[in-house]
Amino acid sequence: MEAGLRAYNRGDMEAAKNAFHRALAIAPDHPDALNFYGVTLLQLAQPASALDYLQRAAHFQRNNAAVVGNLAQAYFILGRYDEAHAAFHKASRLDPQQVQFKLGIGNSLAMQGKFSDAEILLRKLTGRYSQHALAWFNLGNVVRDQGRFEEALACYRRSLELDPQFTDAHNNLADMLHKLMRFEDAEREYRACLANAPGHVIVRCNLASVVMDLGRFGEAEALCREIVELAPAEAVAHTMLGSALAHQGRNLDALTSRLKAAELAPADEKLARDVATTLADCGRLKEAMRWFARALDQNPQLDSAHLLRGYALLGQGRLAEGWIGYRHRMEPAWLREKFPEPALARTLPVEVDGKHICILHEQGLGDEIFFLRFAPQLHAAGAHITYCTSDKIASLLARVTSLARVVDEASALRADADAIIIVGDLPRMVSDFPVSELPATVTSETRSRLPDFPMQISTFWPPVPPPLALSPLEQRLQELRGRLAAIGKPPYIGLTWRSGTPPGEQRMVFWALYKEIGIAAMATALKDIPGTFIALQRKPAPGEITTLADALGRPVHDFTDLNEDLEGMLALLSEIDEYIGVSNTNMHLRASIGRPGRVLVPSQPDWRWMYTGRSSVWFPGFTVYRQSSRGDWHTALAELNRDLAKRD
């Protein structure tokens, strides 16, 4: 027993365990040996093994508060919170001065979902033991779990004032800042936490996560590689590395990390979903479908897996099944507030002839234009359509004959509507494409029935409607023709190198699609191409246009103001000879006037540009140039250069 206690006090748990085990071999029912052996097993993260010894110790020492408290801790670690609550309560009665037993009662209540009761108790404790850092920490956890993040911040800060070396308080404070999207503050706190506990894997993962949220993917990758080296058997380490690599477009490298994470945690449905998504991004649909099946077999209610599988199917031309998955996307918050269920219809009336259908916009301007290609089909069936749009494109859509009325406020929708729907649901609602045998929910029984998909898109594409036809105003055409003539001779080549909100500025729970091609890389592909270059980049950074002009060795004319004047942009896009860039609203406008474009698609593609090939059925006449699964643009830009050089 003495040898075991010496080893325990110096932190050598294996030696302590062996000594206490020898003591029990001599005296199997020795109460102290049972207790210390059980506690040592707890320290070695073996709570299931510890429980029997602590129960026997408590049987012999039922009035020993410390022994009963140790048993309570074992129950708590094993998730047996009712028994933990009872044992902590008994320990507290035996020794009312020990605050840790009272904290155990509060934590047990919280883990049973009894947050109000736990909060009342913990507030009493912080009042009585106002200098006890752990009491403030636990109170912070309880108010955090009730969604009151600002209050939780105050509790964690108070805990750290009392104990600046409290690692978990630093981590939880940083986590709250992270959830509140105060990324810079969260990074500072995570780093402070690591200064105290450099080997803390979860804190390192959290730091890598917030660095990714700040858009510093290369730095996040380096942090994640350190985590993998420190904890190679931890699935979360490989998961984080996979995310850092995927954000850099390096899908093949990301796939290796995500497969390793799924191997280490085979029951984690989100890891299976991530593998499936990466396989789909690499164009490997058959394998992706089997991994999506695995994820949904483990959790049929995982909306993100349904949605991402929908994207993969749409990106490979399986439209009917893809639209079913697309239903699982998140709706905008303003939409849910104004039109709570069941006000929004999920299906159209059986007969739409003569019916008044109100359609609400969602997502971005380009998405509105894209999905409205299905409106003429509804109009042709006899529906009277009112469309609620973004103010920025209202005047363009007002000239679309299939839309009887265009409004820019949801409140302006008529009360006599037979159905109010979301524009992104329109293709599914008007679709009459046959659905394959792909099961909506995959189980172990249905997984074997997953079909093999044809690899040539043309063999199974159903017809899709052409882009919504938009017409520029004659007055704006004349104006833009004059503006073009003033800058030089044709061919006029419009350029866009970035679209979407940069990762470091998103401040959102879920990543929005962001596309960017470096100015230097773009210039290399275009430098020897004759023509007059025009910048159409929305909100260019200071000096970007000058940098592009210097790299091209000739002027780049600034027409970026037209991004705030889409009537002018529509007129310009109908006049210029080439439009080259990443996917954005202007690409949709270009398609709507029947002019071709050249689009640079990242290795994590939007499904509208398909997952493979040099074209998309949604954008007739457009040529697609794809970033490789290794994350480089060299081949795509070389193809762009060759195609431009061969123009008439």
Image (spheres, helix red, strand yellow):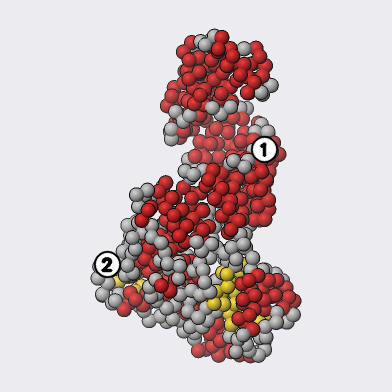
Q: Disc 2 marks which residue?
A: 349
Say which mark, if any, is on residue 199.
Answer: 1
How many numbered discs, if any?
2
Q: Estimate the x, y position of residue 444 in percent, counting from the top left.
A: 37, 48
Task: Identify which amino acid the numbered label 2 is placed on.
Answer: Pro
Q: Crowding near pointer 2: few (<14 within 10 Å), some, many (20+)?
A: some
Q: Secondary structure at mark 1?
A: loop
Q: Secondary structure at mark 2?
A: loop
Mark toward the start of the polypeptide (1 vs 2):
1
Residue pictured at 58% horizontal, 41% vertical: 234
Q: Is residue 471 visible?
A: yes
Give the label, 1 or 2, closer to the camera: 1
Taking 476 as reference, is 424 left or right? Answer: left
Residue pictured at 36% horizontal, 59% vertical: 438
- Real-space Cα separation, disc 1 to disc 2, in angstroms: 60 Å
Residue pictured at 64% horizontal, 20% vertical: 15
Q: Estimate the x, y position of residue 440 in percent, counting from the top left.
A: 35, 56
Q: Crowding near pointer 1: few (<14 within 10 Å), some, many (20+)?
A: few
User: Which quadrant of the structure image shows residue 638?
Assistant: bottom right
Task: Identify which amino acid the numbered label 1 is placed on.
Answer: Gly
Say which mark, if any, is on residue 513.
Answer: none
Q: Is residue 398 visible?
A: no
Q: Where is 271 relative to 16, above or below?
A: below
